[in-house]
Image (spheres, helix red, strand yellow):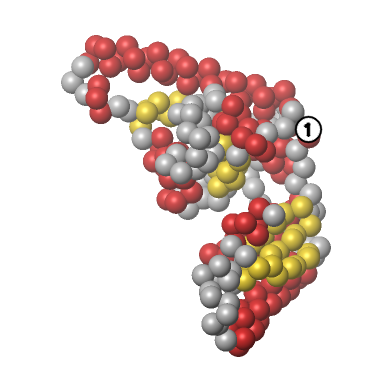
Amino acid sequence: MDRLIDSILIPTDDSEGALAGAKRAIALASRTGADVHVLSVVAVRSDLEGITGAAESMYASLENEAEDAVETVADMVRSHDAELEVTTTVTRGTPFQSIREYATRRETDVIAMGTKGRDGLDRVLLGSVTENVLRTARTPVLAVPPSADTTGVDDIAFDEFLLPTDGSDGAAAAADWGIGLASRLESMIHTVYSVNTSRIVQEKAPEELFDALGRSGEDAIDTVREQARNAGVSVSGAIATGPPADVINE
């Protein structure tokens, strides 16, 4: 299936992390001809309730910064591909809820955002706006860590995709979306299944258990392989052993 991307939402707070996400989004928009929406959310603070004058002064200042943030990304889009249509928006609210609601209301196809913003959290995703968007949005999310930053949008390619699978419904949804996008971008798919034996005492576990886990992996890999081939996408598959997160990163 050819996965169409007609519009991409880029949330930003003008941080380095947000700009890393914006670069990936712009590269993807340029490859697909998608419209770009740039959104900055001024977080509403409960501690300012009842302090009308001071609160409005502070929000006005924050909104000016947010306007600068969306214009920075909009300028990046225009300088990379003048044919892309860009819409900028600044709003007040709870950031992850406002991002999710904007994506739903405007029917955007992808939310692309960095995993580390101005809050300076050392933990990638945990407790962040991005994690909440990932957990609650019905729109696919391209989450970009700061370590994935590159010198420029032109350096970003989408030549190869990794599709981890465990045979679940969630993995099947990701495979459907990923293979469709790979078909559109003429990319190659790699799929991997992790036989997670980290919680199994190997000396006590019967050999039949490991055989069953291996067969489940083969079935999951074969399903992705068949789907990719039917879509005309080049695909490779592998089964590995270890904690899934480690296997995926390696």
Residue 75, image quadrant: top right
Residue 101 rendering spot, x and y as whole percentages: 42, 42
Amino acid under disc 1 = Asp
Q: In front: 81, or 142?
A: 142
The residue located at (58%, 71%) in the rendering is: 197
> Callout 1: few (<14), some (14-19), or many (20+) C-alpha neighbours within 10 Å?
few
The residue located at (65%, 79%) in the rendering is: 214
Could one spot residue 89 in this view of the protein? no
Q: In front: 225, or 193?
A: 193
Residue 72 rendering spot, x and y as whole percentages: 60, 21
The residue located at (37%, 14%) in the rendering is: 60
Residue 248 rendering spot, x and y as whole percentages: 65, 57
Q: Is mark 1 on a helix, strand or loop?
A: helix
Classify the position of the N terminus by image quarter. bottom right
* In the image, residue 52 above or below residue 116: above
The residue located at (77%, 42%) in the rendering is: 157
Q: In front: 247, or 237?
A: 247
Residue 96, image quadrant: top left
Q: Identify the residue position indicated by label 1 in the image.
A: 154
* In the image, residue 79 above or below residue 232: above
Residue 33, image quadrant: top right
* In the image, residue 71 above or below residue 155: above
Could one spot residue 182 in this view of the protein? yes
* In the image, residue 39 above or below residue 139: above
Q: In front: 22, or 3?
A: 22
Residue 174 rendering spot, x and y as whole percentages: 60, 60
